[in-house]
Image (spheres, rainbow, N blue to C red):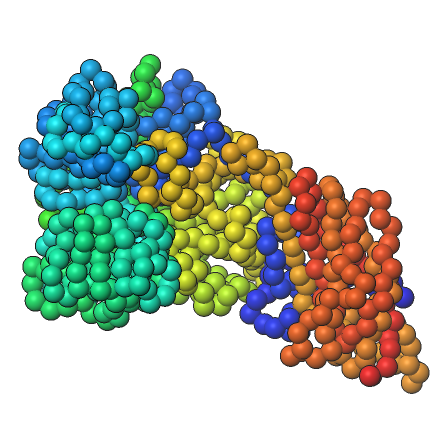
Amino acid sequence: MLQKLGFLPGFNKQVTSTGAESQWTGGENVRFRYGTPEKIGGWSQLGDSKLTGAVRGLHHMVNKNGIKYSLIGTNRILYVYTGGVYYDIHPLTNPLGTAITNAFSTTNGSPTVTLTFSSAHNFQAGDIILFGDASTFSTITNSNFGSANFADKKFMVTSVLSANIITITMPSNETGSGATTSGGITYFQYYHVGPAEQVGVFGYGISQWGGTVTNPQTTTLNGALNADSAGTGGTGTTINVASTTGFPSSGTNFIQVDNEEISYTGTTTTSFTGITRNVRGTTNASHSNGATVTNFSSYSAWGQAASTTDKVAEPGMWSLDNLGSTAICLIFNGECFQWNSDLSNAVDTRATIISGAPTASRDMLVSTPDRHLVFFGTETTIGDKTTQDEMFIRFSSQEDITDYTPTAENSAGTQRLAAGSRIMGAKLGRNAIYVWSDTSLFTMRFVGTPFTFAFEQVGTNCGLIGKNAAVEVDGAAYWMSDNGFFRYTGKLESMDCLVEDYVYDNLNTTSNQMVYAGINNLFGEVIWFYPEANSNVNTQSVTYSYLDSTAKRPIWFVNASPLFIRTTWQDSAVFGLPHATQYDADTDTSFDVTGNTEGVSYYYEHETGVNQVRLGVTTAIPANITSGDYDITQKVVRGAATNLGDLRGDGENIMRVSRIIPDFIAQEGEAIIQLDLRNYSNNAAASSSLGPFTVTTSTDKVDTRARARAIALTISNTAVDTSWKLGTFRLDIHAGGRR
């Protein structure tokens, strides 16, 4: 007889497939709406450019003239997007530029250019240097590189050889005889943001037990390294690099590539020799061509690196907000800047530092409607970064983002929180600012004079896992802690989650700052993007459906699709559709920044179409969803066995499926139906011999011959221009014998 199939919304990954009868157990690129699964919407790249580095901050705003802007902060550059174009508005440490002369040196056959400054430069490897126009350029003697190669171009610093020497990498090799410190130009230095990834470092403090590296020399790999015992960027026990200048050359020394430390016993001009991989407690790993190589030999104190990764280097991130038409942009643990979007030449104007504001803070937001600029985990003495207190809060006077000294005439003030070791993040709510430490939740409410803000601790053992792991929607705060998901609506709630073990058992907690929460208000969803245990960047997502969930049936689902990996997310409030960014380690240098080794990011508009469109290329978004196992019980009526099927059975009998009658509420293109068969719980599921079956909008039924004690259903698609929303499937099921 025909049997309707009904499944509860959401995934249940807390039980086995056998235990999840009448439920869905997993899938990719699907969501639940009105209790029914469907393929998610498509996305399309905004603009035709890639962005340098990993996007770690995203904010939408509208100026007083109605012009919409998207602020996009990568770990290297602050961009603004408007009218389909990206503009670089990153602040400069030397806005007027600095002239250098007799500064360039090159070597025939090498793409490396060495820059020598007359004084300390303060660059770090990966920072951005911008050269001025050709009018300030003087010829480099004996070099084929000229003004066209440098003027008005950005370069990523390849390595720092000393306090006044850096290297950059050209797209091609020097073909001249090579220059020795000749040529000059004006340069501009971008404010430092930080690394693209959050990585573990070794020892007490950073890197060394009781000490630090005194010679922070860096170079880059010339050839990729595999996860083996040899230096496969060279041969045997040799690793090839751009240059070994500045590295110790005798005795046993150490370098670090990503998270792996490597010892060496000798050098040539472009290689380390006598190498030994994965030393001092680190793990052998693969490393891409161009990866940064850091000197880990020279210590300012005693001891060696510890054998466990107990410290982390936090990534370069941004806190972005706006006070009216003025964008406010904070570098994580750094300075704060403003950008006036009302200027007629706004997109050609760079952000500038806010006078009088703190210079080292973990987070920032604009308190509305009272219009205070609030800094979290900031300095106790403004301008002295050594006084940064990670539990200290400082707020400006009302309407004045340059005034932070409390007086009887203003509303500026400070507060130090007591519960926790550091403030992790803050979010503006409907009636309060929510402030999380690593252990607790606080509310911060505007109360006016004389105190300005009132603070209250409202939760314990519920700290925020990462700076961007919380959202606020409809008066409720949702966040991810290191011990589960929480909600605050006036009372603290630990959220029931049927995918919690799946998420936390495979979460890289040392990359906690990668976690990013976003709202898709078009579908009533909170999405958390997070890194798997074997990754330093986001690789998966988990979603809570706050509109369709009930107290008895919270709806959660996960997505491990490599296509749906995002570093930031913004809802549809300003642009009408959600926007998000994706990071790719691709080191393409054909755009924006020459010598980029930090990777690139793509900026997408979501819920548009049914495909992915990137760099003008349309590709399919494969989607699938799989049910738990269902079985059949042979009912007994007045002592006589019947053939009535009951999907809530005990698996006593074999069932035979002869027909599938598909039902889709909406369908575009082809969908695929698969029956997975199993006789015992520990058996691997086997696909029906006649499947999988391709279904179109004109398919009435699918004939099959499937026999098993338990059967699971999978719906999927693989082609472009395909979408579906599941209805109520029916199977023609008959009871068989016990064998």
The residue under the point 18% across, 53% down is 268
Q: Is residue 594 above or below residue 5?
A: above
Residue 43: name its quadrant: top right
The residue under the point 26% across, 38% down is 109
Residue 427: name its quadrant: top left
The x and y percentages for residue 576 are 53, 31
The residue under the point 55% across, 53% down is 561
The residue closer to the viewer here, 472 or 525, is 525
The x and y percentages for residue 507 are 42, 62
Residue 611 shows up from this direction: yes
As drawn, which residue projects farthest toward the front?
177
The reply, left or right, for residue 375 in relation to residue 506 is: left
User: In the rendered view of the protein, which quadrant contains the C terminus?
Assistant: bottom right
Residue 398 shows up from this direction: no
The reply, left or right, for residue 662 in relation to residue 215 is: right
The residue closer to the viewer here, 268 or 12, is 268
Q: How many marks?
A: 0
The residue closer to the viewer here, 474 or 288, is 288
The residue under the point 70% across, 46% down is 724
Q: Is residue 82 above or below residue 42?
A: above
The x and y percentages for residue 722 are 69, 43
The x and y percentages for residue 122 are 14, 40
User: In the rendered view of the protein, which quadrant contains the N terminus?
Assistant: bottom right
